[in-house]
């Protein structure tokens, strides 16, 4: 049990040590990656909200009123 815990701890230290070192070696790459991820998440959320607003009953009512007014 003790050997297992020590090996897991050593693996964790190595893994996070390498990741920590990478952040100091190439901070621009990490920043660009984070910006891309945030941009993707925002675009995904906006698309989802647009889809929901198009499907809402209020939007359908507004479209029907607009069509009736356009016909007049």
Image (cartoon, helix red, strand yellow):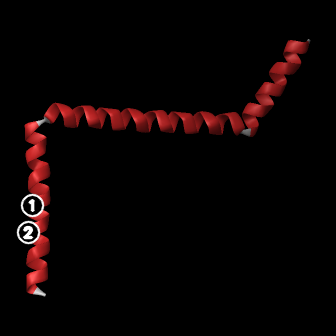
Task: Name the residue at 12% across, 67% down.
Answer: 11
46 vs 59, nearest the viewer: 46
- Bin the neighbour count of mark 2 within 10 Å (Cα to Cα): few under 14, some 14-19, many 20 and up: few
Label 2: which secondary element: helix
Residue 57, position as x, y percentages in the image: 76, 39
Q: Which mark is residue 25?
A: none
Horizontal side of 68 relative to 50 (left or right) equals right
Query: At which x and y percent is residue 28?
Result: 17, 31
Q: Quadrant of residue 61?
A: top right
Q: Residue at x 9, y 85 (%)?
A: 2
Secondary structure state at the residue bearing disc 1: helix
Eyeballing the image, is 38 above or below 13? Answer: above
Looking at the image, is 67 positioned above or below residue 40?
A: above
Question: In the figure, residue 32 lies in which quadrant?
Answer: top left
Q: Report the residue marked by disc 2.
A: 10
Q: Quadrant of residue 27?
A: top left
Total labels: the figure holds 2
Q: Is residue 10 left or right of residue 44?
A: left
Indicate the position of residue 63 as horizontal and vertical percent values.
78, 26
Distance from the alpha carbon under mark 1 to that under mark 2: 6 Å
């Amino acid at each position: 049990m003790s050997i297992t815990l020590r090996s897991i701890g050593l693996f964790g230290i190595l893994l996070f040590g390498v990741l920590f070192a990478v952040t100091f070696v190439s901070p621009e790459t990490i920043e660009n990656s984070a910006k891309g991820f945030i941009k993707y998440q925002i675009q995904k959320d906006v698309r989802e909200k647009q889809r929901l607003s198009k499907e809402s009953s209020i939007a359908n009512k507004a479209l029907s009123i607009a069509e009736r007014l356009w016909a007049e």
